Amino acid sequence: MGVRVTQLQPVILSGGSGTRLWPLSRRAYPKQFLALVDDATLLQSTAGRLDGLSGEVDLQAPLIVCNEAHRFLVAEQLRASGHAARNILLEPVGRNTAPALTLAALDVLGEDPVLIVMPADHVVHDVAAFSRAVAAGLPHAAEGRVVTFGIVPDSPHTGFGYIRSGAKVDDNVHALQGFVEKPDRETAKGYVASGDYFWNSGIFVLKASRWLALIEDFRPDIMAAVKQAYEIGQRDLDFLRVDQAAFAASPSDSIDYAVMEPLSQRSGECLVVPLDAGWSDIGAWAALWEVSPQDEDGNACHGDVIAVDAHDNLLHAQHRIVAAVGVRDLVVVETSDAVLVAHKSHAQDVKRITERLDAEGRNESEFHRRVHRPWGSFEGVDQGGRFQVKRLSVKPGASLSLQMHHHRAEHWIVVSGTARVTCDDNVFLLSENESTYIPIGTRHRLENPGTIPLEIIEVQSGSYLGEDDIVRFDDVYNRAGKTD
């Protein structure tokens, strides 16, 4: 009789907004899409984390659950990394991780694989150790148990929940005796000293059918809403759009609260595998400093940085030189439209900045100056009362929608590449240093028929210049009637 092969389905949950890493992370382009520790983005690193898994494992292409607004970012980054998704499930509204995992389990229930559920925005430096931990838990998950991973603590951290482990049931696998909330410092010290407590990683291994049975048992209201949303969902290019009204009716809850905490009270159903693999959830700037390479003075530097008599700082420059003199334990992050200066001990409070921006009706918490679109990107250059200047970059072969504006006219100047322009019934080409004018109310489209990026300077003028003044008539990305 041959060795049984376990079908392993990675499920990557990519719904986070990463507001504590502002100004690098914005809601329209959160931290999972950023390359914070090496050349790969956090999403790309997560997708490739199991590439070296050995043994009798049939590893599937990743299944992604993400915010609808991030769908093109997810698809593009995965293709660029060589890890094209098996499917991308779109959440029309955020409902936390329990509904997200329920969507994923429903999508693959026919094959009923073992799922490995991973947040998209974690760092794991030692992928070999991670693979060994997964391999240790797989046989138990295949038999119907729920396996999670406890991070071996290196300090009495008060920002994490903890997992309490029990007796060893297998090599490097323990019974799970319970979850505990974020402790105070003295309690955390006792946890670490005991050796029985681990940080809660939020990573799980279990069969798809097992998760659906558990969510039906503990939270049938979530199961009913998500199942309805999935069953009446529709395909859209590379994506599955679930029904918005049905999904919005689902209560919002996490995997831990909805299932894991009550399940841990049942003896023998939950297991924990200790994981010592250089893990971090990069929940704040201080955590990024901890996992980043540091110079002899403890400074973690990125970009054009000069540090003189400075110690233990995180210094991040994107567009200008950042110089630090005689300072310690600071976070300094420079982007094209914002500069953050904070003490590392207050790094968790950066979220208050985004809340203030939202309260004042500003968009710096939502967008970077450079805004990504499926066809490329645009970046604000200048603006005034009745004008706005943008730089557009259109990918080879890409096309903007056929659209019209009620309140603005546009002037396009080609900086590099070749543009194909549709202006009502006229279609023509523009080369470098050539321009055209698009009057208010004119149906128009911009395309890049070439093999190099098309760079355009766009000058908008009119009484209203908001991005929502777009009427789409045709769009290759199925965005007709939308502004994204």
Image: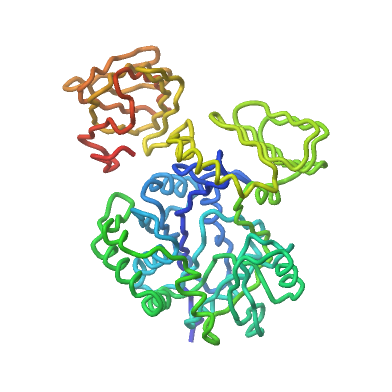
Question: In the rendering, at what x and y percent does residue 169 appear?
Answer: 63, 85
Tell me if 109 is positioned left or right of 37 in this view: left
Pick whichever, 237 or 33, lies toward us.
Answer: 33
Q: Residue at x 53, y 29 (%)?
A: 337
Task: Tell me if residue 210 comes above or below residue 280 in the rendering.
Answer: below
Which colour scheme appears in the figure? rainbow
Q: In which quarter of the image is the C terminus?
A: top left
Question: In the rendering, at what x and y percent does residue 207 appear?
Answer: 44, 75
Q: Quadrant of residue 230?
A: bottom left
Q: Which residue is drawn at 47% across and 82% down?
A: 144
Question: In the rendering, at what x and y percent does residue 456 appear?
Answer: 39, 21
Name the residue at the left extreme. 425
Q: Residue at x 77, y 72 (%)?
A: 193
Task: Tell me if residue 31 comes above or below residue 341 in the rendering.
Answer: below
Q: Which residue is drawn at 64% across and 83% down?
A: 170
Pick whichever, 209 or 350, lies toward us.
Answer: 350
Tell me if 331 is positioned left or right of 227 in this view: right
Task: Tell me if residue 323 comes above or below residue 198 in the rendering.
Answer: above
Question: In the rendering, at what x and y percent does residue 145 appear?
Answer: 50, 81
Count of picture labels: 0
Q: In which quarter of the image is residue 324?
A: top right
Pick whichever, 224 or 70, lies toward us.
Answer: 224
